[in-house]
Image (cartoon, rainbow, N blue to C red):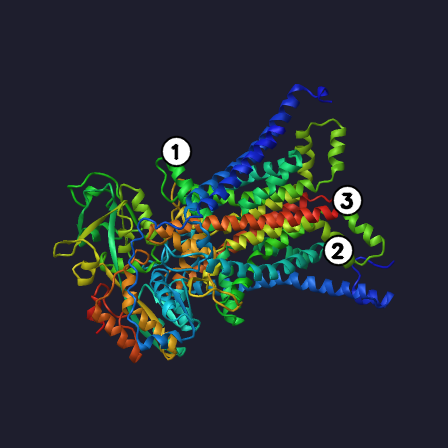
Amino acid sequence: MTSSFSAKRRRKDRQFAGLCLAAVMTCLTILVVLLIKLALDGYRHLTWHFITSPLTVRASTTGILTPLLGSLAVMAVTAAVAIPVGVGAAVWLEEFNTRRTRLSSFIQLNISNLAGVPSIVYGILGLAIFVRWMALGLSILSGGLTMSILILPMVIIVSQEALRSVPSSYREGSLALGATRWQTISRQVLPAATPGILTGVILSISRALGETAPLIVVGAAGYVTFLPTKVWDRYGVLPLQIFNWSRNPNPAMTANAASAILFLMILLLALNSVAIWLRARARQRRA
Amino acid sequence: MMRIRNLSFGLAFLVFSVVMSGCGSGGSSPTPAPGDTSTTAPTPAPSAGDAALAALTGSINIDGSSTVEPITSAAADAFKKVAPNVQISVGQKGTGAGIKAFIAKEIEVCDASRPITLKELAAAKANGVDTVEIPVAYDGLTVVVNKKNTFATSMTTEELRKLWDEKSTIKSWNEINPAWPNQPIHLFGPTPVHGSFEFFTTVIVKTPKKCRKDYQQCTDYSGVAQGVGQDENGLGYLGLGYYTQNTDTLNPVSVDSGKGPVLPSKKTVLDGTYTPLTRILAIYVAKSALAEPQTKAFLKFVVGDTVKALIETPDVGYVDLPDSVYAAAQARIDNGTTGSVLATAKPGTKAEDLFH
Amino acid sequence: MAVRTGEPLIASIRRRGFSLPRVQEGAMRLLSFVFALISILTTVGIVVVLATGAGRFFQSVSPREFFFSTDWSPAYDPPHFGIVPLVCGTLLVAVGSSIVALPLGILTGVYLSEYAPPRLRGLLKPALELLAGIPSVVYGYVALFLVTPTLKAIIHSIDTYNALSAAIVVGVMVLPLVASLCEDAIASVPNSLREAAYGLGSTKREVTLKVVIPAALSGISASFILALSRAIGETMAVSLAAGLTPNVTLNPLQTVQTMTAAIVNLASGDLSSGGPSYEAIFAVAATLFVITFLMNVVANRLVRRFRTVYS
C-alpha cells in the first residue's frame, strides 16, 4: 500500500510521527528530570521515622505524620462531597438535560468559568460560608468542603467529557428495550464512562491534595500539637508544611521540606496507581 | 517500535529505582544535619505546679502573622511536653486576617508582627473582646550584602535613608560612598504588606510606608536571603536569624546611628546598642480567654524561661527581650491588663521603656 | 412507548401508572439537577463576595485609576491601585505557559491515541497524571531551584524572579490536562471516520490532521480553555517563581507580579483588614473573574460552532 504514496507524502508522514513522538519524549523527560531532582534533594531525610513521627519544631526530631493525617482527612471529606456532586451534576447536564434550555447553557458556561477562578478566592468564599456562616469553625470539615467546591468544576467538566464519549448507540439500545433514562444511565452509560471519570477524579483530587493558599485562609495550621482525627479538629496539611519549612532560616529544616516533597510525590504516585488499577478493572469488566 | 517500548520501560525502571532507592537508603537513623546546633531546652525543675499543668485539658486556637508563628509554634511544642492534653494549633493567615479572626472570637490568641491599630482595638472592644498585649521577642533587622561584597561593611542610618528614600536615584554603590566601586546596586526587601516594611520605612527612611518602588519584593525574609545570597550586587534587610543561618552567602552591614558602627547580634540587640532596627514582636490575647486555665498557663509559659531559650534557636531565629520585660509580661497576664502600648509607641523604642 | 424522552415524571406516571423505576428516575433527575445547581450557588457565592468587596473598594478608589494607572502599590502611603502591571504579569505568564503547554499537549494527545502501542499508552497516561498531580508549591520550588538556575546559566541577564520561569513551570503544570483531554477527545472519534479516510488512500498524518483532529475539535478546544483558565488562576507557583514586584513589561526575563500573586500577597500579609488596601483583593479578583468569564463566553461560541456530533 505504501508504494502508492508519493515519497513526499511518506516523508511528511514520518516527520509528523516523529514530531508527536518527540513531544511525548519531552513530557517524559520533564517528568523524569523533575522526579530525579526531587529525589536527590529529598532522599536523605526521608526515613520511616520521618514519616511516622508527629510534628515538632526541631529539624532533627520532626516528622510529617501530623500534616499527613490532616491532608488525608481533608481529602476524604473532599472526595466524599465532590465526587457524587460532580458526577451527579455532569449526569444531569449530559443525560437528563435533553432540552438544552438556556438554564443549562448558563450552568455550563458557569462551570467553565469557575475552573479559572484563583484558588484563594475559594478560600475567601469558604471562610465566609463554611467557617463563619455555617459556624463549622477552623476544622477539617470546612477545609474539606472548601476544597470540594474548588475541584467541583473540574470534576464536572471531565465527567461530562467522559459521558459524551460514550456512543449514543448504548443509550438508544437501552431505551429501545424499555429501560428508563436512569436505568440506562446507571447500567450502561456510567459504567462505560467510568474510566474517563476516574481519570478526571484522579486529576482533581491530586490538585486538591496540593493546594495551600485557600486552606491557609480557612484556618489550616502550620503547627498543631495533636494528631487531627475528628472532622471538627484543627489540622495542618502537607503542602503547607512544605511551604513553611522551605522558608525556615535553618537549612536543616529546608532539607526536611525537600524530604516532605518527595514523600508527597510518592503518595501521589500511590494514589495514581490505585486509580490506574481501578480504571483497568473497569475497562476489563466492560470488555 | 520495539526500541521505543524498551526505551520507555527503561525510563520507567530508572524513575522507579531512583524513587525506591531514596526510601531504602534512608533506612539508617537520621544523622544530625549541619547547622542544627540548637541547644536542648533546659528541663524545668519539677514542682507541684507540674502536676497541675499535666492535668490541663482544652484547646487553644492561635493564628496571625507567619513571622511570629515560629515562636508560638516552638512554645506550643515545648508546652506539649508539660501539658500533653492541651490541644494547641497555630495558623498563619497574616496579622490582618488574624486580628479580624481575633475580633470575631474565632481564635483566642493572635500573633502579630505589627502593633494592633487603635481602630482594630476599638472594633474588638465593640465586639466584646478586651485585648491584652504581650511582648514576646525582638526581631533584630539586619542589613545584608552578598558574601563577595567586602567593601560595604558599615553604613550610617543617613546613607541607608538616602538609599531607600522614595525619590532616591541611587543606582550604583559609589553614589552612596565614593570609595566603593561603580557597580549597580540591586535592592531586596520584604514586600510592603510585610510587617517589617512599615517598621523599616518608619525608622530608617523616616517616611512611614513610603520608599523607593524599584526594589525586588520578596514574600518574606527567606526570599531576601536567597535574593541577596545569589546576587553579588545585592543589598537587603531581613531578620537576624536569617542572617546567622546564611553566613556562607551573606555579609552583615554594621549600622551607625551616630555612636559608631554596630554589628547586629543577640548582645547588641538586647542591650540596645544596635539601634534603631530592633522591632518588638507581640501577641494579643482576649481577656476572657485568660480566664481559661490552659490559655493562661500557656501564655505564662510563652514568656517563661523554656521558651526564652527556644526563641534564640536556629529554627526560630529571634532575640530575647530583657528579663524585666518578661516579668512585666507575666504581670500583664496575671492582671489582665488591657489596651496596647505598642499601638501608640514610637517604633524602635526599647522594650524596657515601654513595658514595666 | 414506555419512555418518552424528556417527559416529565408526573405525566409519565399519569400515563403509565406508578412503578419503582419511574420513581427512581424522577428522584435521580431531581437530585442530579440539585447537584448541577450547586455549581450555580458557588458562582453566586463568589459573585456576592467579590461584588460587595469590590463595591466597598470602588467607593474610595476611582475606577479610572484602577484600570489605567501603572502604579500598583497598595501598601504604600499614599496607596496607588493601578492594575496595569498586574495584567501584564498575568498575560506574560498565561501566554508563555500556553506556548509551552498547547503544542506539546495536543501532539502528546495525538500520539497517545493514534500512534502509541497499548502498553506504552498504559505507561504514559499515568506518567502524565503524575505530572498533573504535582502540587503548585512543589512547582514553585522546582522553578526556584531548577528552572531559574538553568535559565540563568543560559541567559545571564535574567532576574532571580522572572516571568519565563513561571511560564515554563505553569506550562508543565497544565500540559497533562491538555494532553489527557485531547487524547480523550481524539480517542472518542469513531473509527469509521478513520477507516473511511484510509480507504480513500490517506496517510496516517493526513487522516489525523484532516479528519480526526477536526472531528475532535470541541474536546480539544475545551482542553485549551481549561488549561488557559488554570494558567491564569494559578497562584502559588507563580508568586514563588515570578516574584512580587509589579512591573509593566512584556519582557519575560524580568520580574513581574501577576494578579493572583497580588491577591495572595494582600490576603496573607500584615495589613489591617478593612480599608482600600485590603479591599483591593476583591477588586483584583473581580477583574480576574470578569476576564475569565469573557474568555469563556467567546470560547463557548467557538466550540458550539465547531461541534459536530457523531453517532
Q: Is residue C99 visible in the rendered structure shown here?
A: no
Which secondary structure, mark 1? helix
What is the x, y in percent for residue B251? 23, 47
- Pointer 1 residue: C154
Are the two marked residues, 2 and 1, in contact with CB atoms closer than 8 angstroms? no
Identify the chain of the residue marked 2, using the numbered disc in the image.
A
Q: Nearer the viewer, mark 3 or mark 1?
A: 1
What residue appears at the point 59 percent right and 33 percent down from the top-left corner? A20
- Pointer 2 residue: A185
- Pointer 3 residue: C311
What is the x, y in percent for residue C4? 83, 58
Identify the chain of the residue marked 1, using the numbered disc in the image.
C
Find residue C165 and report its image quarter: top left
What is the x, y in percent for residue C11? 82, 66
Q: Is residue B266 left or right of residue A116?
A: left
The residues bearing labels 3 and 1 have C-alpha atoms spaced at a distance of 52 Å
What residue appears at the point 72 percent right and 55 percent down from the top-left corner? A100
The residue under label 3 is which amino acid type? Ser
The residue under label 2 is which amino acid type? Ile
- Looking at the rendering, in which quadrant would you find the N terminus of chain C? bottom right
The residues bearing labels 2 and 3 have C-alpha atoms spaced at a distance of 17 Å
Find residue C201 and report its image quarter: top right
Q: Is residue B117 above or below residue A66?
A: below
Nearer-the-camera pick, B182 or A18: A18
